Image: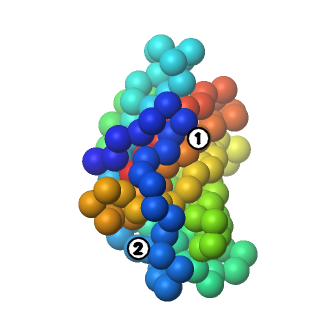
Amino acid sequence: HTTMSAAGSSSSAPPPAARKHYSGLWIGECRPDASLPDIPVNPIKWTMSLMAQGGEVSVFGAGFFDDSGDIPGLEVVFFTLRGTFEQGSGKVSFIKQYSSRMIPEDLTVKYDGSLTLGDDGQPVIAGQWVNAMEGTFGVFGC
């Protein structure tokens, strides 16, 4: 579990330049901005890879959540993750796109953050998220 500062970042050290990729199960949370008190904190549980030499798409992954009570007839919602990772700076930028015909295609969540190494040496991604269609935003860490 990642602890986020007010700026949405976590640790100190930049990622080592020698790694070819960072892949695995990323666990954390998305916290809405304090100006959005009715929006709940959402857990993160993504399978995702960040590739150092990935080109146009160097972040890819997927996930699901099973508490989508706000979408009648759809108990489990799947999504894909895709974007870019810049090894030198640690910058990570990606979009979450839902995989259901019952969800508008324009309903996406944009994530911008940085990959660092946590105090325990494990990779950490933290930053800002925005859901433009619903007008929500906040910080995330995993």
Q: Which mark is residue 23?
A: 2
Residue sitting nearer the eye, 130 or 76: 130
Residue of label 1: 129
What amino acid is found at the position of numbered circle 2 in the picture?
Ser
User: Sequence order check: which comes first, mark 1 or mark 2?
Assistant: 2
Seen at 56% across and 15% down, the residue is: 35
Number of numbered labels in the structure image? 2
Whether residue 121 is visible: yes
Q: What colour scheme has been applied to the protein in the rendered image?
A: rainbow
Placement of 74 over or under 125, stated as above or below: above
Instruction: Determine the secondary structure under disc 1.
Output: strand
**Real-space CA distance between mark 1 and mark 2, rounded to the nearest whole angstrom:** 21 Å
Identify the residue at horizontal 70%, vertical 80% (top origin). Answer: 55
User: Observer-nearest residue: 12 or 30?
Assistant: 12
Q: Does residue 133 sit above or below 27 in this rendering?
A: above
Report x, y in % for residue 62: 45, 62
SS assignment at label 2: strand
**In front of the other: 16 or 48:** 16
| Whether residue 65 is visible | no
Amino acid at circle 1: Trp
Crowding around mark 2 (Cα neighbors within 10 Å: few <14, some 14 to 19, many 20+) is some
Are dots 1 and 2 in contact, CB under 8 Å?
A: no
Q: Residue furthest front?
A: 12
Out of 107 and 36, give the one closest to the viewer.
36
Q: Quadrant of residue 121?
A: bottom left
Residue 133 appears at what percent x and percent y?
69, 33
Q: Position of residue 32 (x, y in %)?
A: 50, 28
Packing grade of label 1 (10 A; few <14, some 14-19, many >=20) is many
